[in-house]
Amino acid sequence: MWREVEVAAVDETRRRTLDDYRSYLPWLEKAALTEEQLRRIPVHEAPDTVGGSLALGYVSPGAPPAVPGEIEAAGTRQIFVFQREVPEDLWERLEAATFKPQPSGYAREGMFTGVPDVTIRDEDHSGPGQG
């Protein structure tokens, strides 16, 4: 019985891993990582100041803090993984799963719409609010 209590105490002080956030990040299924692999990836609540980081998205209120014993956030918050702590093959799979193509705005496409920009000329200044 004493051994069980000791193991539980150690578990409550460890940094949380991506496995602890699996239910908060449904897109993780796209990464096709096993439970064991998810347990090897520590989670942080701020980007790495030394090396590369990957933002994994927002977790909802009620998600556990990355370090047990810290105060839980009242709202949503982002979580991160540090490149220096993640094996290269797992890093690549996480990067691929989090990549979301966005319109670039290049070649005269509207930045937010993805359709070509339209230029409207109002040379006689008779547009809205112009009398």
Image: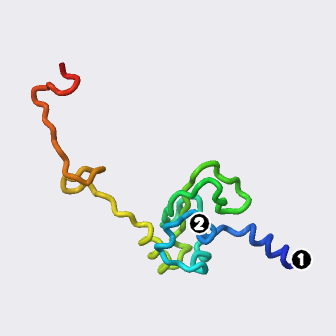
Task: Name the residue at 59% across, 63% down.
Answer: 44
**Image quadrant in which you'd find residue 85:** bottom right
**Image quadrant in which you'd find residue 95:** bottom left
Rendering coords of residue 23 (x, y %): 59, 66
**Image quadrant in which you'd find residue 107:** bottom left
Rendering coords of residue 25 (x, y %): 54, 64
Rendering coords of residue 121 (x, y %): 13, 35
Give the mark, 2 or 1, whose residue is nearer the N terminus.
1
Name above or below for residue 130 compared with residue 91: above
Task: Name the residue at 70% across, 53% down.
Answer: 71
The residue that disc 2 covers is: 23
**For residue 38, which numbered disc appears in the image?**
none
Distance between mark 2 and mark 1 Cα atoms? 31 Å
Nearer the observer, 57 or 69: 57
- The residue lying furthest to the left in this view is 124
Task: Name the residue at 54% across, 75% down.
Answer: 86
Rendering coords of residue 131 (x, y %): 18, 19
Q: Residues within 10 Å of mark 1 (few under 14, many from 20)?
A: few
Q: Given the image, on which type of amino acid does mark 2 rest?
A: Ser
Q: Residues within 10 Å of mark 2 (few under 14, many from 20)?
A: few
Task: Name the residue at 54% across, 63% down.
Answer: 80
- The residue lying furthest to the top in this view is 131
Determine whether the residue tagged by mark 2 lies in a helix, strand or loop.
Answer: helix
Name above or below for residue 107 compared with residue 23: above
Q: Given the image, on which type of amino acid does mark 1 rest?
A: Trp
The residue that disc 1 covers is: 2
